[in-house]
Structure formats: structure tokens, C-alpha cells
Image (cartoon, helix red, strand yellow):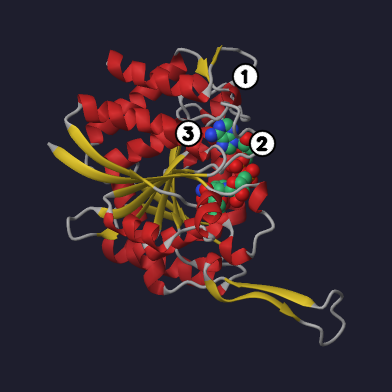
Amino acid sequence: SDSYSLLILPGDGIGPEVMAEVVKIVDWFGANRGMSFDVSHDLVGGSAYDRHGVPLADETMARAQAVDAVLLGAVGGPKYDDLDFSVKPERGLLRLRKEMDLFANLRPAQCFDALADFSSLKREVVAGLDILIVRELTSGVYFGEPRGIHADDNGDNEGGRVGINTQRYTSGEIRRVARAAFELAMRRGNKVCSMEKANVMESGILWREEVQWVHDNEYPDVELSHMYADNGAMQLVRNPRQFDVIVTDNLFGDILSDAAAMLTGSLGMLPSASLGAPMANGRPKALYEPVHGSAPDIAGQGKANPIACILSFAMALRYSFDQGEAAAELERAVERVLADGVRTADLMGPEGGTPVSTSQMGDRIVAALAAG
Ligand code: NAD
Ligand code: IPM
Ligand code: MN
């Protein structure tokens, strides 16, 4: 049988609540689809800080490097807002991404028909939407040097300080994420739109030139267009179905993918896969996580929508385990439960539905899998 090692890092806030539902799904596929999962659990974020004084212990980092796939819930929360920057929960997640070199972050936004009336946009704008944002994840202004907060009291600077971050991209970093986008586009609508601010940033000019270079030399048959990211944000809410694959940098990708979330009805619906280069076994290093955060406003109340995290496991089935059939089976189960009107609080619109808790939603999806 096919055997896969999984490291589960539930994290903080609603992270553990949604991850508990994913575990039910993992168990179901283990029991019913001839896959065997070697599952281990560990801490990340504030929960790791509480135990170890750091948001990601070195042993956890080493375990993440060794498994077939990492599943992560979410990190952060008000309890940790005043911690020193170096040990904030978010640093744990950023360390995982950087040290595993997960440069391609796939953030699909699909509008399930059952939720088309629930989007904040009109049904006719979002119905049938199926786009994929490929966000560069290990470079750009998130990691560029120099960075920091320094005294800057020469002159007439009121407050006497300066905060610095650096947007920096190498041609190699741009080319590899561009390749990931073109490869994915060939298996979908064969269209890539690259977004940057080449009108104001040199790094944007390089981005545009290098994406074009990869296109012209390696993927001439994929349709490529370029857009300034601010216009891209506008186009994403004006007419999102004009897009197939969007490729963009770390910060623009962060913002554009949260905006895209609302096209699908709820941030609680959006999964993601963060992929690196192939390992010796041919599988990419990989981490799967929902796009949403730890949602401190609803944590501990059984209100969180677990679908983003569950669909992230579907992406693991597809991209890490080569189980595309099983991934589609899970996606269909989610679709059927939504079509039956089963709704966590974030999906409750004026048209009503059957209100369920986080754990009831997980049970419904397992039942839909079992019903086939
Ligand atoms: P958030 O995504 O946690 O929440 C934004 C809003 O969406 C909230 O109203 C929340 O209740 C709602 N929401 C999010 N996920 C939901 C779900 N599954 N079901 C129902 N409603 C959901 O963003 P935020 O409030 O800006 O950040 C909270 C904390 O999470 C911060 O510490 C932030 O740094 C962290 N964060 C972590 C990640 C991550 O771990 N990948 C991502 C984003 C934010
Ligand atoms: C995300 C989050 C993270 C990011 C934070 C928590 C570090 O917003 O995954 O979208 O900014 O990348
Ligand atoms: Mn984000």
C-alpha cells in the first residue's frame, strides 16, 4: 500500500479546531482507500513559544524537513502581540517556509455553486470562478536585507526612528516561480497573468523581464500577460473570471489572495499548498495550510469553518501523494455538503441553511465521503 509521512502542526487559535477535522479525513482515507499515513504532531507559533520559548523548535524544523508533507493550521493571536519580533508566532511559519525553501505558494480560489449567492460580489461575476494565484513565498520584502527599526535622529525626523524593509528579487528566484506558474497553467486554462509594479519598482521591472524570458524560451504556447498589481486588484473584483493563473511576488500575493477569498464567499474556504524543489523521491518539499489565520475573534467557540484546512489536505493528496483521484473525491464531498445547505457561521447568508459547528462540518464531510 502507499505509505506517507505527515507532520501535523495545528498552531494557535482556530488552528487546532480545524485541524481536528482534517485528522478525521486523514483517518477516513487511511481506513478506506488503501493509503497508510504515518502521522506525527508537533507545535508551531504561540503554542510552541509557550512550551519552548521559540515559535518553532529546531527539532520541529528537522522533522518538517524529513516528512512527505507538513499540514499546518494557523499561528498567532493577541496573547502574543507584544512578544519580541524575533519570537512572534508568525516567525515560526516564516522559518518553515524559508528553510524548506517553499518558493511556490499555490492559492486556488474556486467559487462553489452553492456559495455563489453568498459572495460579496454578484453571482454573475463569481459563478464558476476557478483561478489560481501562485505567490512567491521565500523572498521579496518579507526576507530582504537590510531590515529593522533603527534610531534616525539626524535632522528633523519627528520621533527619531526609521523602519526598513527591502524588496529584493534575483532573476533565479523569479524564474523558478514563473516556471511553476507556467507548468500549472498548462494543466488548466493555459493562461498566466503576471502582476508587479514595474512602473515604480526596479524589482518589478526585473520581475516582468524574467517572467517574459521564461515564457519566450520555455513556455511559448502558454498565453502570458502582464498587469500592474494595483490594476490587478481592481480587475480581480471587477471581472475575476478573466484570469486563470496569476503569478506574483510575496507581498502582492498575500494581499491579492485575501481579496480573492471573498470571491468564494469566505476566507474559511481557501486552501493553499507551498511547494519547493523535488526531493530525492521526486516529490516536492511541501507544506499545506489554509489561507486564513488563527481567527482570535471566533477561537474556542466551535464556529470556525474547517473547509479551507480540509481542502488543503486535498491539495496534499494531489501534489505530494500523487492521489489526484482521492483529492477530487474529497473536493466532491465538500461540494455535496455545501449543496445540501450545511453551513458554518461564516457561510450563513440570508438564504439560510443548516447551521453546524466546526466538528459537525467535519462529520458531514466524512459522511459524504462514506456515501460515495
Ligand atoms: P484571520 O484570517 O485570522 O481572520 C480574519 C477574519 O476572518 C476574522 O473575522 C475571522 O473570524 C475570519 N475567519 C478566518 N478564518 C476563518 C474560518 N476558518 N472560519 C470562519 N471565519 C474565519 O486574520 P487576522 O484576524 O488578520 O489575524 C489573526 C492572527 O492570525 C494574526 O496573529 C495573524 O498574524 C495570524 N495569521 C496567521 C496566518 C497563518 O497562520 N497562515 C494567516 C493569516 C493571519
Ligand atoms: C499568510 C499570512 C502570513 C503571511 C503571516 C501569518 C506570516 O498572512 O499566510 O497569508 O503574511 O504570509
Ligand atoms: Mn495572508
Q: Is residue 230 above or below residue 295?
A: below
Residue holding disc 1? 349
Q: Nearer the viewer, mark 1 or mark 3?
A: 3
Left or right of residue 289, residue 354 in this image: right
- Which residue does the image show at 48% across and 33% down from the upper left? 18
Q: Which mark is residue 56?
A: none
Q: Is residue 50 above or below residue 41?
A: below
Q: Nearer the viewer, residue 247 or 79?
A: 79
Disc 1 element: loop
Q: Any atom of ligand 1 within 8 Å of the CB at mark 3?
A: yes
Residue 64, image x, y percentages: 34, 55
Q: Quadrant of ligand 1?
A: top right
Q: Residue furthest left?
A: 1
Q: Nearer the viewer, residue 259 or 25?
A: 25
Q: Any atom of ligand 1 within 8 Å of the CB at mark 1?
A: no
Q: Earlier in the sequence, mark 1 or mark 2?
A: 2
| Real-space CA distance between mark 1 and mark 3, rounded to the nearest whole angstrom | 21 Å
Q: Any atom of ligand 1 within 8 Å of the CB at mark 2?
A: yes
Q: Is residue 239 visible?
A: no
Q: Amino acid at mark 3?
A: Val
Q: Which mark is residue 297?
A: 2
Label 1 packing within 10 angstroms: few (<14), some (14-19), many (20+): some
Q: Residue furthest front?
A: 51
Q: Are marks 1 and 2 in contact (CB under 8 Å)?
A: no
- Which residue does the image show at 85% across and 86% down from the upper left? 155
